[in-house]
Image (spheres, rainbow, N blue to C red):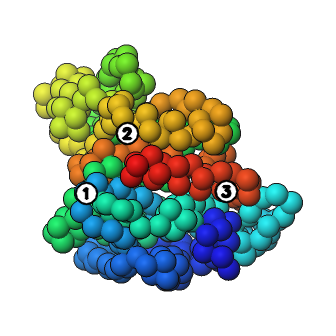
């Protein structure tokens, strides 16, 4: 296998069944490729009492500033029924002009393009190139990038800029760069009542009507109308549940789950205060309720400027396209990296990510690798 070939590296990574939290050999394969190219490679495992142990990788070449880092994840989502795939999900088979396999576009393909580009570029005359690779992006993200960044900082690493290789493009390579993401906050609204027989409602206290009023209050008024860089924040109710699952019993409690994707007009804390006030206004003072909040993901935005321009120009040189600068989509590990340095996301086309027959055109893999190499050439010029 040629270490300089993005397609060959992607095949090697795809053949590793690294479904979260399993390492599956993917970090072993990447580590060997980078070590053979002269990189200092560290395997960094993290543990937590409530989540699976995770293995991570940090590799670097060079020293000092400027420090450019590529970030990504080798863990993948389950493939589903392998029999439903045209080619086995962990075979890395090439059919026609496409590479098939779980992780082809999300995001082993981008990591392969990172590696091929960085190895071809070589050691910078000044400064550092590094890789921050986790096995915990598709999972709970507890023992992954957040802890790896802290570990690197404790070792004295200071990052100046980062590209995350998430599949950002919507239709063709070069059409979109993510310069930010909305934050995410999930919660469960619990309304309490008194259980009883439906034929004797005066002997019970049905919490369902209060839940309906509270949920209506949560969704009836928009959170905002958006900003110059972000779409409007939105709250989606995603589920209801009851303490009883029978037709003739009034429940003692009912629940509604919801998620908010929010822009830079809010913080998780300000949203919690706002939604609590809405519920309190919707129900009477004697109603017993609570909102259980899940850990939040912050909103972030990388300001337009020289770094974003550098990436956009590299994309234009290789693809002849001017990418749209976007903040759409879900969350990514860039939400952790933004606390350490400016970060943008650019990778492959995401149309088949997480799907049966996930795949990527061979030409896109090679073109993405050339884009990353051009970024390095411009960055360290």
Callout 2 secondary element: helix
| Near-viewer residue (124 or 294) | 124
Q: CA distance from mark 2 to mark 3?
A: 22 Å
- Which labelled disc corresponds to residue 366? 3
Q: Residue furthest left?
A: 285
What residue does disc 2 label?
A: 307
Dot 1 corresponds to which residue? 65
Element type at marker 1? loop
Earlier sequence position, callout 3 versus callout 1: 1
Earlier-in-chain disc, 2 versus 3: 2
Secondary structure of the residue carrying numbered label 3: helix
Q: Residue at x 33, y 36 (%)?
A: 302
Residue at the far right in the pictured view: 96
Q: Position of residue 6 (x, y in %)?
A: 63, 65
Q: Nearer the viewer, mark 2 or mark 1?
A: 1
Q: Are marks 2 and 1 in contact (CB under 8 Å)?
A: no
Position of 19 compared to 248: left or right?
right
Residue drawn at x 63%, y 32% as measured from the top left: 321
Left or right: 76 with respect to 274?
right
**At which x and y percent is residue 255?**
35, 44
Are there few (<14), some (14-19), or many (20+) residues within 10 Å of tag 1?
some
Decide if residue 252 is on the left or right side of residue 14.
left
**Quarter of the image where one finds residue 309:** top left
> CA gap, disc 2 to disc 1?
15 Å
Marks 2 and 1, the one that precedes in the sequence = 1
Q: Is residue 285 left or right of residue 307?
A: left
């Amino acid at each position: 296998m040629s270490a300089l070939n993005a397609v060959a590296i992607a095949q090697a990574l795809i053949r590793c069944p690294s479904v979260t939290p399993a390492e599956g050999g993917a970090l072993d394969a990447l580590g060997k490729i980078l070590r053979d190219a002269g990189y200092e490679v560290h395997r960094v495992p993290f543990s937590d009492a409530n989540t699976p142990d995770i293995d991570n990788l940090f590799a670097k070449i060079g020293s000092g500033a400027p420090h450019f880092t590529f970030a990504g994840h080798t863990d993948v989502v389950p493939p589903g029924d392998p029999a439903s795939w045209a080619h086995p999900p962990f075979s890395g088979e090439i059919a026609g002009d496409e590479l098939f396999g779980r992780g082809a576009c999300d995001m082993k393909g981008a990591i392969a393009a990172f590696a091929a580009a960085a190895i071809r570029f070589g050691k910078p005359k000044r400064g550092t190139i590094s890789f921050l690779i986790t096995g915990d992006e598709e999972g709970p993200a507890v023992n992954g990038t957040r802890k790896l960044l802290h570990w690197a900082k404790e070792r004295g690493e200071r990052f100046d800029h980062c590209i995350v290789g998430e599949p950002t493009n919507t239709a063709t390579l070069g059409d979109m760069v993510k310069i930010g993401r909305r934050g995410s906050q999930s919660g469960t609204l619990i309304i309490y009542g008194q259980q009883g027989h439906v034929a004797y409602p005066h002997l019970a206290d049905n919490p369902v009507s209060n839940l309906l009023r509270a949920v209506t209050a949560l969704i009836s008024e928009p959170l905002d109308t958006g900003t110059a860089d972000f779409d409007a924040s939105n709250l989606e109710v995603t589920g209801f549940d009851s303490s009883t699952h029978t037709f003739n019993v009034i429940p003692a409690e009912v629940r509604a789950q919801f998620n908010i994707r929010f822009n830079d007009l809010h913080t998780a804390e300000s949203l919690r205060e706002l939604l609590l006030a809405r519920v309190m206004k919707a129900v009477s003072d004697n109603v017993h309720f609570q909102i259980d909040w899940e850990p939040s993901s912050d909103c972030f935005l990388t300001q337009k400027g020289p770094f974003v321009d550098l990436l956009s120009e590299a994309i234009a040189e290789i693809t002849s396209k001017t990418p749209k600068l976007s903040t759409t989509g879900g969350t990514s590990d860039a939400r952790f990296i933004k606390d350490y340095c400016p970060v943008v996301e650019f990778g492959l086309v995401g149309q088949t990510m997480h799907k049966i027959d996930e795949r990527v055109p061979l030409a896109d893999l090679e073109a993405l690798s050339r884009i990353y190499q051009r970024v390095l050439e411009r960055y360290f010029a």
